[in-house]
């Protein structure tokens, strides 16, 4: 058994920043060929340069089935195979009950639920026996912060997807699992904090977020990537249908 991904081809949606970028970087470090998708070409190009190695990018919107079908056609044309799908693309719209708009609801569920379906379903024809699907969930499914019912609800929906899908693909050898992070130290998190804080205050706020965690800190994106490597590798060959919380233990306390 090995964690190495040598010779494997992986697609990571929403791979131009944050958790998706960390996952793509770890996959490259473990020898995979990686295709990232995101909404803007410049962001993809910048990320591919940062990731290095055998990484390319494709502009695609996960809420559009035609976009994702085109992604897989291009992967098949370029690489002739696909071994791993990481459904990472997601958004969070926050609003308390009584203030939730139809647009917020539709956008949140379109990206976080329909986008996962449209990422996974058209990939099935390419995934071989031993192929892996990793879907990025969230601790918000079990401990949703106030105002995050839409985000937590959409992420909870994919838990039900996977429970059913592992039965739908029975006999194919394809494994499907959910990887659920807690707070992660990403550029987007820091940028959001920087709108109302100085740089020193941002660092202090990040430390404060981690103070209540059993590990005493929040995660680095590459740590989420390491867990995704495990779920994509032969080391997890008999692991399917699970939700792996990569949150420093917060879901347990």
Image (cartoon, rainbow, N blue to C red):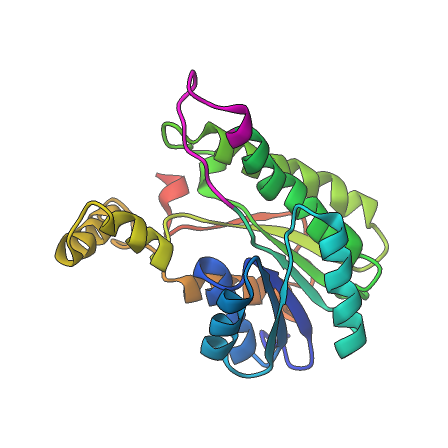
Q: In which quarter of the image is residue 160?
A: top right
* Residue in the foreground of this view, choosing between 79 and 245: 79
Image coords of residue 125 (percent x, y): 84, 59
Residue 156 appears in view: no
Residue 241 appears in view: yes
Magenta stretch encompasses residue 103: yes
Q: What stretch is highlighted in magenta?
A: 91-104
Image coords of residue 36 (percent x, y): 59, 66
Residue shown at the point (40%, 47%) measured from the top left: 182
Image coords of residue 104 (percent x, y): 51, 31
Residue shown at the point (54%, 36%) measured from the top left: 108
Indicate whether 78 appears above or below 203: below
- Report the magenta stretch's main SS: loop
* Residue in the foreground of this view, choosing between 127 and 93: 93
Image coords of residue 56 (percent x, y): 61, 75
Residue shown at the point (52%, 73%) measured from the top left: 45
Which quadrant of the figure contains the N terminus?
bottom right
Which residue in the rendered view is the most extreme toward the top?
Answer: 98
Left or right: 174, with 107 as reference point: right
* Residue in the foreground of this view, choosing between 202 and 82: 202
């Amino acid at each position: 058994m090995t964690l190495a991904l040598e010779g494997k081809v992986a697609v990571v949606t929403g791979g131009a920043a944050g958790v998706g970028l960390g996952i793509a970087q770890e996959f490259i470090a473990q020898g995979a060929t990686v295709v990232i998708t995101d909404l803007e070409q410049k962001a993809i190009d910048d990320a591919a340069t940062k990731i290095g190695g055998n990484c390319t990018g494709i502009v695609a919107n996960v809420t559009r089935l035609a976009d994702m079908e085109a992604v897989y056609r291009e992967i098949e044309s370029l690489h002739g195979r696909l071994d791993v799908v990481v459904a990472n693309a997601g958004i969070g719209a926050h609003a308390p009950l009584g203030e939730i708009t139809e647009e917020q609801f539709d956008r949140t569920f379109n990206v976080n639920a329909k986008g996962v379906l449209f990422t996974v379903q058209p990939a099935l024809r390419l995934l071989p026996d031993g192929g892996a699907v990793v879907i990025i969930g969230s601790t918000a499914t079990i401990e949703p912060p106030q105002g995050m019912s839409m985000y937590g609800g959409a992420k909870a929906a994919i838990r039900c997807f996977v429970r059913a899908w592992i039965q739908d693909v029975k006999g194919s050898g394809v494994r499907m699992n959910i990887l659920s992070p807690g707070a992660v130290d990403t550029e987007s998190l820091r940028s959001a904090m920087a709108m109302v804080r100085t740089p020193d205050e941002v660092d202090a706020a990040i430390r404060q977020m981690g103070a209540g965690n059993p590990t005493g800190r929040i995660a680095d994106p590459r740590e989420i990537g390491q867990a995704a490597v495990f779920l994509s590798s032969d080391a997890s060959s008999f692991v399917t249908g699970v939700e792996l919380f990569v949150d420093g233990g917060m879901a347990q306390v």
